Amino acid sequence: MTNCANIVSPKGGPKDTTPPEITKCIPENYSSNFNEKKISIYFNEFIQLKDLKSQMIISPPFKEDPEVKLRGKALIIKSDEDLKENTTYTFYFGNSISDITEANSVRNFQYVFSTGTIVDSLTITGKILNSFTLEPEKDVYVMLYTNNEDSIPYKEIPYYVTKTNEQGNFYLKNLKNTPFKLFVLQDNNSNYLYDLPNEKIAFADSLIFPEQYIAPVIPDSLVNDTAYVDSLTLNNINKENIFYLFEEIDSTQRLVDASLIKKGKLKFIFKFPTKNVNIRPLNFAYPEDWKIDEFNTSKDTLICWYNNIEKDTLLLEVSDNKIVIDTSELYIQKTFMSEKEGEVQKKEKLLIKSNAERGFDYFKTLQLLFSNPLKRYNFSETLLIENEEDTIVPKCSFVDSLKRRVNVNYIWKQNSSYKIIIPDSLFYDIFDFSNDTTIFDFRTKSIEDYGVFIINIEIKNPGKKYIIQLLEENGERVLKEILISNSTTLKFDNLNPGKYKIKAIEDKNNNSKWDTGNYLKKIQPEKVYYFDKEINIRANWDVEEDWKL
């Protein structure tokens, strides 16, 4: 008895994977003629609440959040708010209730009651997608109103509300038999009102009618399999109720940001493309040419290059199209010479970059980019060496008026090696900085390194205009863009091996760009389509597909 036992820690048995079970509700779930101020929901084990504020949705919403607290194994809800007559209320808890041991959640639990004689049982389901990317939009409010006035989302909280799940699907249950106005809101300030200009929205063009919900048949053996139950529920979504989330354009021009990137370089970012920008100093006298302006392609970002201004602070007035937008105060950081003996301050250098990669596309133009605008330059000593044999002085030309971008004009050979040598101090910028010796070493590809994609597009209604875009796999960058209005065959050649996407934008107003919607004008965002097959390009291969738009 003293020696036969092996003393070890107890293993504790199998891991708890079962969520808490509801043993009773007072009043009962799905009660009618409800007039209580307190609800008690009892479980078979101790529970905890997680992310209740973001998970719990009350529909119709209360004016003030009810008091929710735990007492033993019970969840207690208290509220003194007067309830609407003959109305079915739903308390949706999402996944906020779980046990305290393994955090097993009670998935999608809801407590329902009616202040009238019957509990409403109709349903509206659907899906919310991003209008430009067609990606599902999660955690956006889908709201119903009995009032059909256009202004109602601005001034009143909804009659019913729910949130979309990870797949962008929504379920509005326990609805009464009446038509509703449907409005979707990405509610940035959580007040159920469309009152911020950057809140994304979607809306139904006409009234929505609820319908009887047909529950999926679930085998007894799979009742507790939440993944299986969820997949069945997803299949019951009304595919016709797809709404596209968009952000309306606030047409007021704004200065988003003003900053000093470095001494001599200011950056201004605007909300919209600019028309006629003017930057006027307010704290010093300035000549007309005190700066040089450089815009990006979309004209919503301005770089101002300046020199010989000995001010600690720049106070600037920013206007666009003769309308003053803002004033900006920018502090110029000064650099001082170190007083340590023998230490010499390093002089800044003019840097040169190139778009020449190790595998350079032989059909492209090689471009040099200087870190600052040039004041003096000498291309005659720039050398180009081809295949380690031929030495050439290439023809160079400026692309922009600032003299920052230079094209190296040369017909590149396939599968050849090149070296561009730029000797020291050939170029001086507006700050009198010069370049160090710079060498660009690269090799061109051959035509066999590329693939070709051919797509036969059939347009059902000729005359409709579409913008066809070839995109990178992640969909963020447009590589090529073509406008079409009839069935046609498009060929995209010289494609590097990899995966691509094809996107079509229905250009309703013929302005050659995608346009968002407008709620009060009842304008939906322009429709977007994606080719539903993966486009996988391989070297020296042609891929051909058919697409019915």
Image (tube, rainbow, N blue to C red):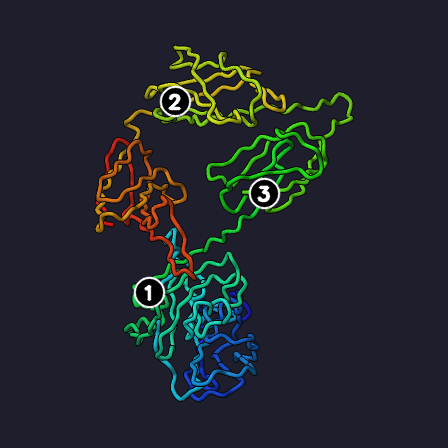
Q: Give whichever of 157, 99 is nearer the camera.
A: 157
Disc 3 crowd, CA 10 A, few/some/many (<14, 14-19, 20+): many
Side of 480 relative to 94 (left or right): left
Amino acid bearing label 1: Asn
**Residue that carries the numbered disc 3 in the rendered image:** 319
Disc 2 crowd, CA 10 A, few/some/many (<14, 14-19, 20+): many
Of callouts 2 and 1, the N-terminal one: 1
Q: How far separated are the C-alphas under marks 2 and 1? A: 53 Å
Amino acid bearing label 3: Ser
Amino acid bearing label 2: Arg
Image point 45% across, 84% down: which residue? 24
Image coordinates of residue 314 in percent, x first then y, are: 68, 38
Secondary structure of the residue carrying tag 3 is strand
Q: Give whichever of 523, 495 is nearer the camera.
A: 523
Image coordinates of residue 527 in percent, x first then y, are: 33, 53
* Mark drawn on residue 241: 1
Q: How far separated are the C-alphas under marks 3 and 2? A: 47 Å
**Residue that carries the numbered disc 2 in the rendered image:** 443
Depicted 420 relative to depicted 188: above or below: above
